[in-house]
Amino acid sequence: MVLAAGLGVRMRPLTDHMPKPLVPVAGRPLLDHVLDRLAEAGVAEAVVNVHYLPDQIIDHVASRTHPRVIISDERDCVLGTGGAVVKALPLLGDAPFFHLNADTMWIDGVRSNLARLADAFDPARMDILLLMAPTASSIGYHGSGDYAMAPDGSLRRRKENEVVPFVYAGAAIISPAIFADAPRGEFSLTKMFDRASEQQRLFGLRLEGVWMHVGTPEAVHAAEDAYLASVA
């Protein structure tokens, strides 16, 4: 599943007349960079949710076949990142699924990070496995991190006024079972992250390569420079 329903407020004015997932970076929309990663990982179908300027996204992905895109239409409601998944569950099936933000970009190391996530996901121990980027080497990120990660990969959320070394890179594998008694309507996916953490079933995998936080117009240029340098 790819989250593509956000308003992109911090990306204005680029998003005044264009949804954030269609903002181009290095000549391709953010959404295509994400879908390309999924295609490279062997994903045949991707659910993409839409809300803000939905027809632009629907038209953009209509002819895509790798992966084929299924639309989860949220134009009439605001569901948040968690509610969006609950609505899409019938389209996602019963198996663990990749979950990506439409604005996440990274440069892979030797091996695909999505392939590494798939290999590392252990349903016996995990409900959620997050791709974690080291804050020190990330481009466009200036926050205090999201999680501390133990040697076994288990995650602990950052406490107030604490600085931790890893930020969630916007890509994960999630077991649909964790949504069995999820709230109805709008809620944040971090509620599910917290629930998995409380049950000691939230884990992380360190990203190999470089992650780019593409949250503002200024960050687009930094991401472009890094991406183009990596493929030159």
Image (cartoon, grey):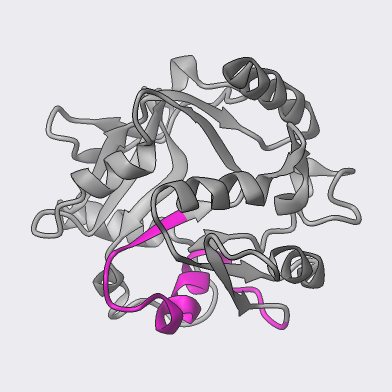
Furthest toward the left, the residue is 124
Residue at point 46% right, 38% down?
Answer: 169
Left or right: 148 in relation to 62: left
Q: Position of residue 84 (x, y in %)?
A: 52, 71
- Residue 73 drawn above or below residue 141: below
Q: Residue at x 32, y 43 (%)?
A: 115
Does any portion of residue 88 appear in the rendered image?
Answer: yes
Q: Quadrant of the C terminus?
A: top right
Number of numbered tags placed on the structure image: 0
Q: Is residue 1 above or below residue 154?
A: below
Among the 4 quarters of the image, the one containing residue 70: bottom right
Which range of residues does the magenta coloring cover? 76-99
Q: Residue at x 40, y 75 (%)?
A: 92
Image location of residue 214, percent across then percent down: 65, 35
In this image, 112 relative to 121: left or right?
Answer: right
Query: Which residue is painted at 56% across and 53% down in the image?
Result: 35
Q: Is 55 drawn above or below residue 158 in the view shown?
A: below
Q: Is residue 14 left or right of residue 119?
A: right
Reply above or below: 84 against 143. Answer: below
Taking the image as shown, residue 183 lies to the left or right of residue 222, namely: left
| Percent x, y of residue 137 | 47, 16
* Residue 159 in view, yes or no: no
Task: Choose between 202 and 4: the one closer to the eye.
Answer: 4
Which one is in front, 109 or 165?
109
Q: Is residue 179 highlighted in magenta? A: no
Q: Is 82 part of what is drawn in magenta?
A: yes
Residue 131, how many percent across, how many down? 36, 40
